[in-house]
Amino acid sequence: MATAKEPAAGWTVELDTTPGRRQAQEEFVLHHPDGGDERIVLHDYARVYAVPGLYEEVVQHRLQCASPATVAGALVEAAEAEGRSADGLRAFDLGAGNGVVGEELRDRGVTVVAGADGVDEARDAAHRDRPGLYAHYLVGERLDVDEVTALVHDEGLTALVAAGAVGEGHVPVDALAQLWDAFPPGSFLALTLAGGEGGKDATDVEQMIADTTASEHPSRTVVRRRFRHRVSMAGDELYYLVLVAVKD
């Protein structure tokens, strides 16, 4: 186990550095101020989000997660490449969690309108930790496409953003395609995808984009590059792909 660190909340975190674990298998121990210990699976987001500051301590600080900043920066980069400005974008944050990505978007001038996640605890944590960031926050493993379509239309949304939230174990690519269909021409799709350039998630999403070629409003990739997503609890570097497409 790694050395525990003392955050302001009084609890400490001890990472389980057992090598060879997949991201979904990583665990840590939360040492409570009263002396009790709790072993938590990192991907048990409902439990992680229930403790204020715990997600940021483990994922952002200890594991050095770069996906939120990377996807936000890439969206702005893509917009500028298309002659657009960040302050003209209105974003839907898919897999929003407690608002880490939304905050990165807002800090770059993007108007963050809506978020969505699969668990109620994520919504509750977003409103607790970053009040006012999301005017709308949807909850569901698979969102109602009609509801999203109405939201896109009513709120003038022009960016669909997902940091590590698409692919195996998260939002299926076919569900992403349905949500992307709801966005108007000129909109941006900004994602970080597990596995880097050759990963299955990246391959599936790029095929989804390629399948729009014959449609009335095809999508084309503006930004595409590999980056270091974070380190594992065992200290290995994990690489993802950041991809931003625009709908013509």
Image (cartoon, rainbow, N blue to C red):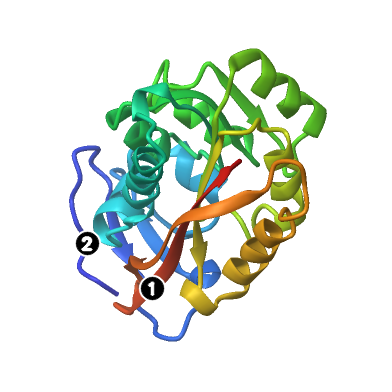
Marker disc for residue 45:
none
- For marks 2 and 1, the one nearer the N-term is 2
Q: Viewed as shown, does residue 125 lie left or right of 67? A: right
| Residue 119 sits in quarter | top right
Residue 85: where, in percent of width, then height? 35, 29
Residue at image position (52%, 55%) is 221
Residue at image position (33%, 65%) is 230
| Residue 110 sits in quarter | top left
Residue 111: where, in percent of width, then height? 42, 22
Number of on-image labels:
2
Structural crowding at the residue carrying mark 2, measured as other residues with C-alpha within 10 Å and reported as few (<14), some (14–19) or many (≥20) = some
Q: Viewed as shown, does residue 28 lie left or right of 33? A: right
Q: Which residue is mark 2?
A: 4
Q: In the rendered image of this protein, does residue 223 appear above or below residue 1? A: above
**Gap in Å between the C-alphas at discs 2 and 1?**
22 Å
Residue at image position (31%, 26%) is 109
Q: Viewed as shown, does residue 63 lie left or right of 247? A: left
Residue 69: where, in percent of width, then height? 32, 47
**What quarter of the picture does the N terminus occupy?**
bottom left
Residue at image position (34%, 52%) is 70
**What quarter of the picture does the C terminus occupy?**
top right
- Amino acid type, label 2: Ala
Q: In the rendered image of this protein, does residue 56 appear above or below residue 116? A: below
Q: Is residue 75 visible?
A: yes
Q: Is residue 168 visible?
A: no
The residue nearer to you, when weighing 127 against 111, is 111
Q: Which residue is mark 1?
A: 238
Q: Secondary structure at mark 1?
A: strand
The residue nearer to you, when weighing 112 against 62, is 112
